[in-house]
Amino acid sequence: MLSIDLTGRRAFVAGVADDGGFGFAIAKALREAGASVCVGTWPPALGIFQTLLRRGKMDAGRKLSDGSLLEFEKIYALDAAYDVLTDAPDDVRTSKRYAELGDFSIAGCVEKMKADFGDKPLDILVHSLANGAEVKKDLIDTSRAGYLQAVGVSAYSLVSMVSKFGPVMRPGGSVLSLSYMAGERVIPGYGGGMSSAKAALESDTRVLAFEAGRRHGIRVNTISAGPLASRAASAIGIIEQMVAYCAENSPIPEGITAEEVGSTAAFLASSLASGITGTTIYVDKGYHSMGKGLGGPTGAGKAAESA
């Protein structure tokens, strides 16, 4: 009988700040499979996240199949906009939300993990990071600063994380990121350079799979997930319409769940996927395969189906 067994492996999931998104679902699935899980949380959200955990506000979402609660081995402050601490401007480093956190850069997280767990502490690295300050703007109206910020935080951060975490990962390790179809198709309303960032993320996945595979013996893949109405996705402004449209027009006419993405991530992190690298895996109920829609979230598709 085949099973996903990650016992004895350690994962670091970057981009967890609540219990409603893909990052949390992936962390939970990895723990269900036996891995120990550390997370990296954006400093401005860190205090709220820790308070919600401490007060039990996420206990329902943290419940595992055996009745126990998901526990994080460590929670690190991480701002993936900064490769090293000196990249952060003085006003950021000295601000109220950052000043007491120590080194919150990508390199800082690596050093903290080494101090906590040894020189080769990691088997699974998950990049669940995306941010575009101008995501509600059409690409043609996006400023240079907004575009570069979206690509830097949402795509280059993967390159930086593989560069810095790769040397401390054990052979056979797995790196995973989260993409979206806007990287290859036009999604009106998903702007601000975020479509460019997802395209870069998928291209970088292929190149990093080759380079990190040869240098460190690790695999690099990305999941192109269908839209999910998470708290983070609410920044897009049209997420509910996106979810409804995809559900209406997919081969399996329903929306995806975060748990489906989590299960796929656990599989990709396991030895069952040892032959898969440099690949974009779609978890979208088949929406990516469609060349023509049945209609919008108006019921037109269902009417055609029943005719």
Image: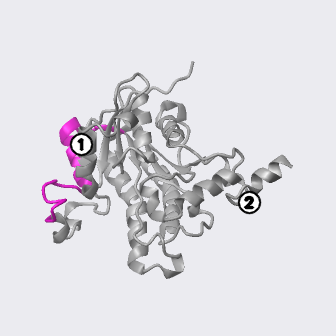
Q: Amino acid at mark 1?
A: Met
**At 32% across and 58% down in the image, what residue appears?**
80
Q: Position of residue 213 (x, y in %)?
A: 45, 46
Q: Quadrant of residue 33?
A: top left
Q: Nearer the viewer, residue 218 or 8?
A: 8
Q: Quarter of the image for the N terminus: give it.
A: top right
Q: Which residue ends up furthest to the top in the rendered image?
A: 1
Q: Position of residue 164 (x, y in %)?
A: 31, 52
The residue that appears at 48% across and 33% down in the rendered structure is 270
Q: Nearer the viewer, residue 202 or 40?
A: 40
Residue visible at 52% across and 76% down in the picture: 139
Q: Residues within 10 Å of mark 1 (few under 14, many from 20)?
A: many
Task: Please state which of residues 155 and 41 is positioned toward the viewer in this rendering.
Answer: 41
Is tag 2's residue or tag 1's residue first in the polypeptide sequence? Answer: 1
- The image shows residue 4 at horizontal and vertical percentages of 49, 27
Which residue lies at the image location 49% right of the left edge and 31% below the top edge?
A: 271
Q: For mark 2, give the secondary structure.
A: loop
**114 over 145 or under it: above or below:** above
Q: Quadrant of residue 10?
A: top left
Q: Is residue 110 visible?
A: no
Residue 111 lies, with reference to residue 142, above or below; the image says above
Q: How many marks?
A: 2
Question: SS for tag 1?
Answer: helix
Callout 2 environment at 10 Å: few (<14), some (14 to 19), or many (20+)? some
Cα–Cα span, label 2 and label 1: 49 Å
Per the rendered image, the range of residues in magenta is 94-123
Q: Which residue is mark 2?
A: 295
Disc number placed over residue 274 in the picture, else none: none
The residue singled out by tag 1 in the image is 113
Any magenta on residue 106? Answer: yes
Q: Is residue 130 visible?
A: yes
